Amino acid sequence: MDKLPGVRLSAVYAPGDGKPVTRAEMTVTAEGKATGTLNAPVTGKAAMAWSGDQLYLKGDDDFWAQQGPHYGNDLTSSGHWVKPEKRYGYYMLDSFGVNAGSLNPKSLASVVREVTSDPSVVLEDAGSVQGRRATSYVAQGRTVTLADDVPHTLFAIGINPADARPIKTASWRPPPASSRAISAVHREPSDDIDRTYNPYLIAKVEPATAKEAATVRTAAAEADSTAVPPLTSAEKVKTSQGPVFTTTSNDPYLCTSKPCSYSFTVKNDGDEPAEATLHVSFPGIPDRAHPLGTLAPGDSKTVSGTRPNAATGTGRTVRHTDHTWVYSSALYGSDPKVAQRLNARALEPDDVFVATPLMPTVAKLLDLMTKDAASTDTAANEKAVEALRDANSRGQLPLLMVIAASGRLQNPEDLAENLSTTDKIGDARVLQQVAHLLKTDPKARVWYDGGYKADDGKTYKTDYIFISNQGGQEMKRAVQVKTIESWKKLWPRMGEAAEQLNGEHKKGKAKEGKRGPEKAPPGFERVVQVNLEPSVGDGYFYSKADLERILRHKNYAQARQRLCKENGELGLDRLVIANATGTHEWTDLSKLDLPCQEATPATP
């Protein structure tokens, strides 16, 4: 490897803490230049280049939307090379925090030598790779898979970039030593979930030709020469207030005329221009809208009019309250009705503490989460605000942006409750899958961990239920999701999913927490979705053939019974397993040697 002009890598980067993985295809030269593509969490794609210890990106709209304007990028960055800022304490790209140039042949060779010569190295049979017998060498949280025969070709490598010098993270400064704990590699029967919470990179490795390396140098040079900074800097977004509207009443304290006059001055005390409309309401007059046009920072505009004297005919002084508020699409989005409903609930997007570019999305989410509750329900307000604050702190707001933009979530009233547990990796994965489904299937209508009322009048619930159309055929699926951090938990968790799909989980036992009884609606395909995490060990990068071979192994003969119903019939219609190598599906479950009976036809 030391003599190779470059390497081609098919990589999966798991940021840790349950965040979505990024898939990368790239070529890295011997001197540490790289080009390729990144497929970002949920959706979105970017061309990437690495040169001179600097990352360059050319992303589409979806890619930049998911990076978040509060991180210094906006949609106007789409379509050209961008030179991301190096931000102290952060990776230059949170979803791919590895120095791509350090994945060069010499660095990979160095890691191979370290792992294979480590006194604690563990050797495991890796089966057949590319038609050759292979062995995995595991030491100090690193895994390399080599061909058994000469030449000992490197097929794959698994590392935490912070623990695999000379391979490095993409941070401006390396993380402090205290944050770079070495995590164990996990194999049956010993499992340790630490690696789930640390960044991890798994890559398949192939040699690149001299011609491919030359192409990389040319492409990296082009990116370097044409790249511009993000069009909105991170610091500017952080310090910007955006438009801030202040309303002042110019009316005297006491009105004795008939009618009374009113006058209000609206000033933009912020640092960005924005169009605005002043809404005023008085006793007996619910709402009047006064368009103000665009107010530049520091500018103000005064509006005036008349209204009835509330004391007319009473013979006394009448105290009353006048209400004003300012609508701007920069703060509430393009639908004034969203702003009106939030105003009636005394909710503002600024309650969630996000940068101005994100406020319209937050306004839409707050409205979705509360509009079915009474306007006097302050508890619903507080729950929605808290849920969005927490989701934002976890980096989940881009996922919610996708859900809000789709307009096809059928139970938005459950969103605040669902988000309350997305600090757990399993619930985070469900949120990611729902967002991905709504983004990639424009016909899907989704019930996210909420009740679906079927034609039989009963309400059913699974992790998510969706109805779509594929090739002119209606598609109806109920999905139960299990995120597996330990290989030993695979069969118990899959069995639990099958029980839930058939309403057989914990029958007769009291239900705790928000989750009520779960069961797939009649006529829906029952889907068990399994997400394998890096902590499961080799299973994280098994191919479909590998998984099939393992699942039908004689050692799991009894475990396979878990996927049958109590009456012995099949407990699922589709098995889906997602890992580093992709998303693998089985609808012909006979290939897994399940001991279940086919469903008995209903008696006419």
Image (cartoon, rainbow, N blue to C red):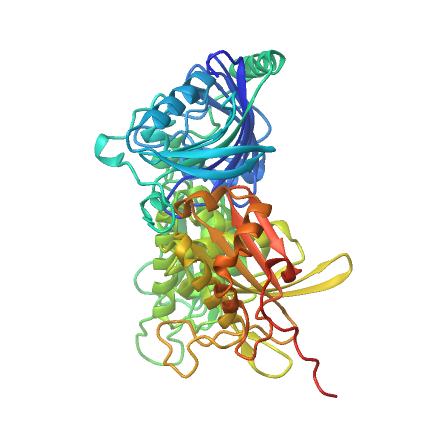
Q: Quadrant of residue 345?
A: bottom left
Q: Quadrant of residue 27?
A: top right
- The residue furthest right is 472
- Residue at image x 61%, y 78%? 454
**Looking at the rendering, in which quadrant would you find the C terminus?**
bottom right
Towards the viewer: 312 or 553: 553
Q: Can the viewer see residue 124?
A: yes
- Residue at image x 38%, y 20%? 110
Instruction: Establish if 253 lies above or below 140.
Output: below
Q: Return the x and y of residue 61 as percentages of the image width and height.
A: 57, 37
Q: Quadrant of residue 420?
A: bottom left
Q: Can the viewer see residue 295?
A: no
Q: Return the x and y of residue 326 as percentages of the image width and height.
A: 44, 53
Towards the viewer: 374 or 103: 103
- The residue furthest bottom is 604
Towards the viewer: 26 or 202: 202
Q: Is residue 548 left or right of residue 538?
A: right
- Residue at image x 51%, y 24%? 153
- The residue furthest left is 178
Q: Return the x and y of residue 192 as percentages of the image width and height.
A: 32, 48
Instruction: Establish if 422 lies above or below 22.
Output: below
Instruction: Establish if 150 lies above or below 316.
Output: above
Q: Is residue 149 left or right of residue 354?
A: right
Q: Return the x and y of residue 358 as percentages of the image width and height.
A: 45, 45
Number of callouts:
0
